Image (cartoon, helix red, strand yellow):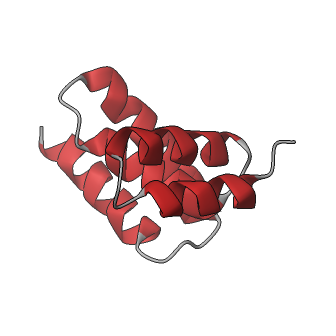
Amino acid sequence: AGSGSAAREIALYHGTRNDKLFEFWSWIGAENNDPVCQYNYASILQGKADSYSHARAYFWMKKAAAKKVEFAEDALREMEKGARDN
């Protein structure tokens, strides 16, 4: 039914078992405004090599930081610093 918190629970369940399912359910939760999923999904996207994923990572990290997710504000600052340095 579009519950971000339910998607987070499913993502966390799969987190140590299946990376693809963790990514998928983190994305679903992010889309449904779960701030922890937004942070997790942004973190996953940061690890990808393409610039499109990095742009999406910034988008989701910014949303998570705005909701005061632990570590998200620091991660966002590091992303912005890295962008300035490049």
Q: In the figure, is residue 84 to the left or right of 17?
A: left
Which quadrant is the N terminus positioned in? top right
Q: Nearer the viewer, residue 66 or 20?
A: 20
Q: In the figure, is residue 7 to the left or right of 79?
A: right
Which quadrant is the C terminus positioned in? top left
Above/below status of 47 relative to 34: above
Q: Residue farthest to the bottom? A: 70
Residue found at x 50% / y 37%: 24
Q: In the figure, is residue 62 to the left or right of 46?
A: right
Residue found at x 80% / y 51%: 3
- In the picture, residue 84 is in which quadrant? top left
Above/below status of 85 relative to 17: above
Q: Nearer the viewer, residue 14 or 8?
A: 14
Q: Position of residue 18 (x, y in %)?
A: 36, 47
Q: Position of residue 5 (x, y in %)?
A: 72, 61
Q: Residue farthest to the right? A: 1
Q: Position of residue 47 (x, y in %)?
A: 22, 43
- In the picture, residue 20 is in which quadrant? top left
Q: Position of residue 85 (x, y in %)?
A: 13, 45
Residue found at x 40% / y 73%: 71
Count the marks: how many? 0
- In the picture, residue 67 is in which quadrant? bottom right
Q: Nearer the viewer, residue 51 or 39?
A: 39
Q: Nearer the viewer, residue 25 or 47?
A: 25
Q: Residue farthest to the front? A: 17
Residue found at x 34% / y 61%: 16
